Image (cartoon, rainbow, N blue to C red):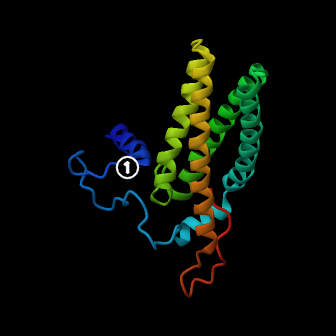
Amino acid sequence: MFTSSVFDRLIGTVDFCPFASVAGRCGHGQQPLWKAKGDPLYSEDERKRRDATAWTLVQGVLAPIQFLVFLVSLGLVLRFMATGEGLAAATVSIVVKTFVLYTIMITGAIWEKVVFGRYLFAPAFFWEDVFSMLVLALHTAYLAAMFSGAPVREQILIALAAYATYVINATQFVLKLRAARRERPAPGTGSVALGTSQ
């Protein structure tokens, strides 16, 4: 009984199945998959948790570092494509970019758990998290291609696909950050405007 309850709670932190009754759950009190347009991004409690946790600062530091690593790596990849030189530097840069991505994904999941109570797919960041999974899958596919000795052209094309999805995902998060900053607390709460997002 205790084990089952603990297991159910663990599954519940990442479960976003919309068909609760089919999956054997009553579905009462479940959150919607994503926030409806016009709904506030954070509840009052979520905003307080976001502002109080050190993981918000971690995300705020890692995001620009990842973008800088991306720009350097993209330059090295494009240089290799244009000249045929610098494959080793381009490869190292892609691997570094991938590990920075893993770091920001893991710490971002922890941030999401602290703020929203689940590691992934909280309604406020559902679509960002969905696309993040594609970004992560493509970066991982690059590592698999590199370690399996796939042709260099194939490796580079996978890396470029990973980078294109990363740019889209980063744009999603920037737009969400802007939306969070434009949000105002509900009348009478006395809270200040939102600060940084993930």
When asked about the image quadrant of residue 191, the answer is bottom right
Question: On the picture, is 41 further left or further right than 1?
Answer: right
Q: What residue appears at the point 46 percent right and 54 percent down from the top-left corner?
A: 126
Q: Position of residue 177 (x, y in %)?
A: 62, 63
Q: 116 above or below 6? A: below
Q: What residue appears at the point 38 percent right and 46 percent down from the top-left corner?
A: 15
Crowd rating for badge 1 (residues with CA inside 10 Å; few <14, some 14–19, many 20+): many
**Mark 1 belongs to which amino acid?**
Phe
Viewer-nearest residue: 103 or 37: 37
Viewer-nearest residue: 104 or 85: 85
Residue at the bottom extreme of this rendering: 188
Viewer-nearest residue: 147 or 61: 147
Count the marks: 1
Q: Quadrant of the N terminus?
A: top left
When asked about the image quadrant of residue 23, the answer is top left
Q: Quadrant of the C terminus?
A: bottom right
Q: Position of residue 175 (x, y in %)?
A: 59, 62
Q: Position of residue 85 (x, y in %)?
A: 78, 21
Q: 38 above or below 115? A: below
Residue position for label 1: 16
Residue at the front extreme of this rendering: 82
> Could you say whether the residue bearing mark 1 is in a helix, strand or loop?
loop
Question: On the picture, is 164 further left or further right than 97?
Answer: left
